[in-house]
Image: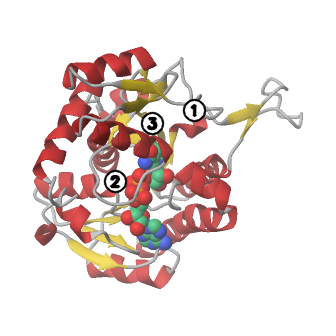
């Protein structure tokens, strides 16, 4: 039974590729599909690409009715993630939260069993407060998200858990900052930082790297973790950290870059935004145990894979 993928950007395109490689023909719904960029990742003759807006519930119904959909993977989000939501909170809240509610409602009405959504590791860092030590009778018992984007992702996880209680098999994937090949606009600030760093290193220009430790996940690993959640026999847990499994210090990132580009010139960027630096990595034990997820692209592997893609599509970029 086909899977409906919503959002065909940096991560959604890789999800489509994996399903096609498994012999499936996913339905891919996107408001503004970037066909050229998509074709660099997946054989588009093997997917059903539908133009549609997740904020229009009937579009979702149509896409679900088009195939006998077994699962929905929802990756669409307001552009530029944290930065975009700080600039335009209303639009981000509407798309990130109400878009997901539309997906969950459509799944409930049409009897789609499983919904997997993209959450974010911002919920492991962009949090503040929680000084009442978890005492639920007190007002500040739990930390709150410190950005609009994180607030939308927390809302989505909480709403999803409640849909799970009424029968939808819900899972939320907390990706670390996603690095990966993508020929169009997409991703968030760190995605662009990785892309600029790589493109500069490839072109022999100075590469700018983050000034502190960060977590990352390669887009192919983020997609694989998501597909594993969509296909797991059972979901005894509903939220999964999906990262490279470690925080990567500025020195480690520089060493990786020099391994791939021995002559590269490197400069450190300005200090990271509060909440972005990570000395303690997200714990991925749950994803490893339940989804049998193992990151396949450590930083050097990610850089080599990006380089291969870049060489292949240099003309198209
Ligand atoms: N990129 C990252 O660093 C990162 C990190 C953590 C979590 N995430 C989450 O992963 C998910 C995927 O991120 P990405 O980097 O692939 O994003 P992206 O911007 O590359 O792709 C999102 C896609 O959704 C589509 N879209 C936007 N609005 C839509 C709408 N109303 N209806 C239908 N489609 C719509 C866009 O056209 C785009 O193709 C998002 O939910 C994001 O919050 C991303």
Q: Is the shortest distance between ligand 1 and the CB of mark 2 under 8 Å?
A: yes
Instruction: Determine crowd level at label 3: few under 14, some 14-19, many 20+ residues with C-alpha closer than 10 A.
Output: many
Q: Residue at x 28, y 81 (%)?
A: 66
* Viewport quadrant of the N terminus: bottom left
In the picture of the structure, the residue carrying the numbered disc 2 is 10
Q: Is residue 172 visible?
A: no
Q: Residue at x 24, y 63 (%)?
A: 38
Rendered position, 295 above or below 109: above
Rendered position, 191 above or below 51: above
In the picture of the structure, the residue carrying the numbered disc 1 is 276
Expressed as whole percent of the image width and height from the top left, the position of residue 173 reads 44, 44
Please tell me which of labels 2 and 3 falls first in the chain: 2
The Cα atoms of the two marked residues, 1 and 3, are separated by 10 Å
Q: Which mark is residue 6?
A: none
* Viewport quadrant of the C terminus: bottom left
Residue placed most toward the observer, 289 or 118: 118
Do residues under tags 1 and 3 come within 8 Å of each other at their CB atoms?
A: no
Q: Quadrant of ligand 1?
A: bottom left
Please tell me which of labels 2 and 1 falls first in the chain: 2
Image quarter of residue 191: top left
Q: Is residue 171 left or right of residue 149?
A: left
Q: Which mark is residue 176?
A: 3
Q: Is residue 224 left or right of residue 114?
A: left
Expressed as whole percent of the image width and height from the top left, the position of residue 171 reads 45, 48
């Amino acid at each position: 039974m086909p899977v409906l993928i919503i959002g065909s950007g940096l991560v959604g395109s890789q999800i489509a590729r994996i399903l096609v490689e498994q012999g499936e023909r996913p339905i891919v719904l996107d408001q503004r599909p970037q066909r050229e960029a998509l074709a660099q990742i997946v054989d588009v003759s093997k997917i059903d690409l539908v133009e549609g807006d997740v904020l229009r519930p009937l579009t979702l119904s149509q896409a679900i009715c088009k195939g006998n959909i077994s699962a929905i993977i929802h990756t669409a989000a307001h552009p530029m993630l944290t930065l975009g939501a700080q600039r335009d909170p209303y639009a981000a809240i509407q798309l990130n939260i109400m878009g997901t509610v539309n997906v969950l409602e459509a799944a409930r009405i049409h009897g789609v069993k499983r919904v997997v959504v993209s959450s974010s590791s911002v919920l492991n860092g962009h949090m503040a407060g929680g000084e009442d030590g978890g005492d639920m009778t007190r007002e500040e018992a739990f930390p709150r998200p410190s950005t609009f984007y994180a607030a939308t992702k927390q809302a989505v996880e909480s709403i999803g858990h409640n849909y799970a209680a009424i029968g939808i098999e819900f899972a939320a994937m907390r990706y670390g900052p996603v690095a990966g090949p993508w020929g169009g606009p997409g991703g968030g600030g760190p995605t662009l930082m990785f892309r600029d760093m790589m493109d500069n290193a490839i072109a022999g220009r100075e590469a700018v790297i983050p000034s502190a430790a960060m977590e990352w996940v390669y887009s192919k690993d983020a997609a694989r973790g998501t597909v594993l959640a969509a296909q797991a026999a059972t979901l005894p847990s509903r939220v999964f950290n999906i990262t490279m499994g470690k925080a990567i210090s500025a020195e480690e990132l520089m060493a990786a870059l020099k391994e791939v580009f021995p002559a590269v010139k490197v400069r450190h960027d300005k200090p990271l935004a509060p909440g972005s630096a990570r000395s303690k990595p997200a714990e991925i034990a749950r994803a490893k145990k339940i989804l049998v997820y193992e990151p396949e692209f450590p930083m050097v592997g990610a850089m080599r894979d990006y380089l291969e893609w870049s060489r292949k599509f240099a003309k198209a970029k």
